[in-house]
Image (tube, rainbow, N blue to C red):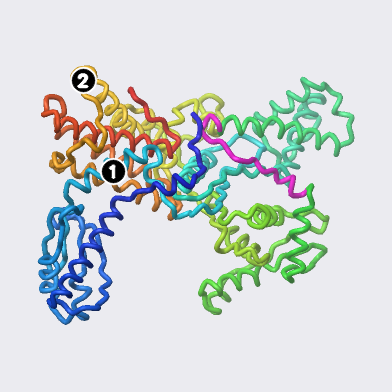
Amino acid sequence: MSAPNTRNTENEVRTMINMIQAAKDQVAALTQAAYEKAAAAGVLPAGTVVKATIEIPKDTAHGDYASSFAMAGAKALHMAPRQIAQVIVDHLALEGSYFNKVEIAGPGFLNFTLGPKWYGEVLSAIETEGPIYGSGAEGAGKKVMVEFVSANPTGPMHMGNARGGVLGDTLANVLARDGWDTWKEFYVNDAGNQIAKFANSINARYMQLILGEDSFPFPEDGYHGDDIKDLAQAVYDAHGESWKDLPDRERLDKLAEYGLSVNIPKMETDLKKYGIVYDQWFLESSLHSSGYVEDTVSLLTDKGWTYEKDGALWLNTTELLKKKYMAEGKSQEQVDKLDLKDDVLRRANGFYTYFAADIAYHRNKLEERKFDLVINIWGADHHGHVARLQAALDGLGLDGSRRLVIVLMQLVNLLQDGKPVRMSKRTGKAIALHDLLDEISVDAARYYFNNRAFSSPLDFDLNLAVRQDSENPVYYVQYAHARICSLVARLAGEDGAVVPAAASVDAALLTAPEELALVKALAQYPEELHLAARDYDPSRINRYLTALAGDFHRFYNACRLKGEEPAVLSARLKLADTVRSVLANGLNLLGVTAPEKM
């Protein structure tokens, strides 16, 4: 399955329609017009500006939208709220509006009840926008990079990478729908200590194949996985013992290069199978070979943020963080209590640290490639690194505290039969992404890993993920989509009924509570998309789709289609098909298929 397009066009942004906001705007306009009419008649004082709130009551018995105009204007208008409310109601002109009645409640709330025009326009808006329904303009075409997974290429990807992959990919899709020009990136850590350890591990296994396992020591901090043995065996099969007599440095470089040439394409293949395609795989090594790390450290030195001690070059992280925290409103006393420490940028042996490379990489994002915002999906264990990196970018004058957002993701607990699962049945080793996808579908994996907010630990129940019933949320949502497809096909075959255009539907025939609730749920989708983008929380889309599927099932059980009067059948069929469209829209954002049959 191809990944959803993450590019926004100008036309996509322009066609956005938010019917909930449209209703709120109309409440404000109708109320203001009624006030001005009353003022012109001398019933209310003229020239008063009233700042009212417009809310959606939890109980629809209180109307669909409630305005606080009467209470907010009481002091300025020198009149009791309920008197003001009555005057407004007396001067309201609802003809042609989204509302069919207004009632006064409590201390003076103006409760507006939606009429058929609004319900019909919701269906029309979704029909008009089709697969881009819900799109927003908050991003205004600004460039955002989402960097995610970025696992070390020294072994298979694990469960944390699996969750981070879905969160990052889905968040990028959501941001694109909210008007951002979105870029997906994988940062390949192909330099530094972990690559040296990787090369030494393959080297030990290679030499053991030649000399015997007891004749060549394995490094204490080496990588012990079977994948290392497989790499060593592949080198031996291709080159025999010829690499044994190479100088150590040359042999280690060749082994690292070979290992990466195998592992990185494997990672790319696994992620493609998972529905994730990146715009770029960025190599850490390119930052070193181009001199960009050295240049970045020199810039920090030129700005007075480094010093030398014990032969190493240090970043004055303490002062950078103090400056950052004071700017954020912390007091001097609060800052003084923090356990702040400086960081090494260049070791005494002349090698740059991972932190130095990380600063350079993010400078590249912000300064060279000019992203307005960069978002990283990291494991929660990296929390101590967040403020330090932001502060370092602040020190370079790149406004890292505002332009760099780190989404810290909590752990995944894999469960089966109510017990934790840490080992693959197939390999007997720690569960890797490719092991998981041997057990469950890509759809189930993607839906489940995005089913909770990133800030919450996730219990992933393997038994539940393969169940075909309403307890399984991905099945529940997909079944709703398939059920509608089957319904439309069946009615077309048996009764010749076809899904009508929205313009030919009489929305006044949609009167059942389940019908009205379903249309309101459809109208909520643009707001859910916007909030998911604003809060960097794509799990909102899962919760929305699950609730929408529930609303549809309740409508289907309460409202008959077959055998109804043609006009009623037409309206209900259009409503059902509109739900199908929005379910497919949301599932596509999640990278999950919308099946027509199940």
Give the residues drawn in magenta, as a range: 272-288
Q: In this view, does 417 lie above or below 495?
A: below
x and y percentages locating residue 279 in the rendered image? 60, 40
Nearer-the-camera pick, 438 or 528: 528
Q: In this view, does 557 lie to the left or right of 237?
A: left
Nearer-the-camera pick, 405 or 336: 405
Is 286 contained in the magenta span? Answer: yes
Q: Is residue 64 above or below residue 230?
A: below
Where disc 2 sits, the SS reads: loop
Q: Residue at x 77, y 68 (%)?
A: 302
The numbered dot on residue 248 is none
Q: Which residue is drawn at 21% across and 20% down?
A: 496
Residue 283 visible in the picture: yes
Mark 1 burial class by Cα count in 10 Å: few <14, some 14-19, many 20+: many
Is 337 contained in the magenta span? Answer: no
Amino acid type indicated by mark 2: Gly
Residue 102: name its quadrant: bottom left
The numbered dot on residue 496 is 2
Nearer-the-camera pick, 164 or 383: 164
Check the picture and name the quadrant holding the C terminus: top left
Mark 2 burial class by Cα count in 10 Å: few <14, some 14-19, many 20+: few
Q: Which residue is drawn at 81% across and 24% down?
A: 210
What residue would you read off at disc 1? 522
Total residue callouts: 2
- Pointer 2 or 1: first along the chain: 2
The extreme top residue here reads 494
Eye-nearest disc, 2 or 1: 2
Is the Cβ of the residue at disc 2 closer than 8 Å to that at disc 1? no
> In whole angstroms, how far apart are the C-alphas of marks 2 and 1?
27 Å
Nearer-the-camera pick, 342 or 291: 291
x and y percentages locating residue 196 in the rendered image? 75, 42
x and y percentages locating residue 378 in the rendered image? 55, 50
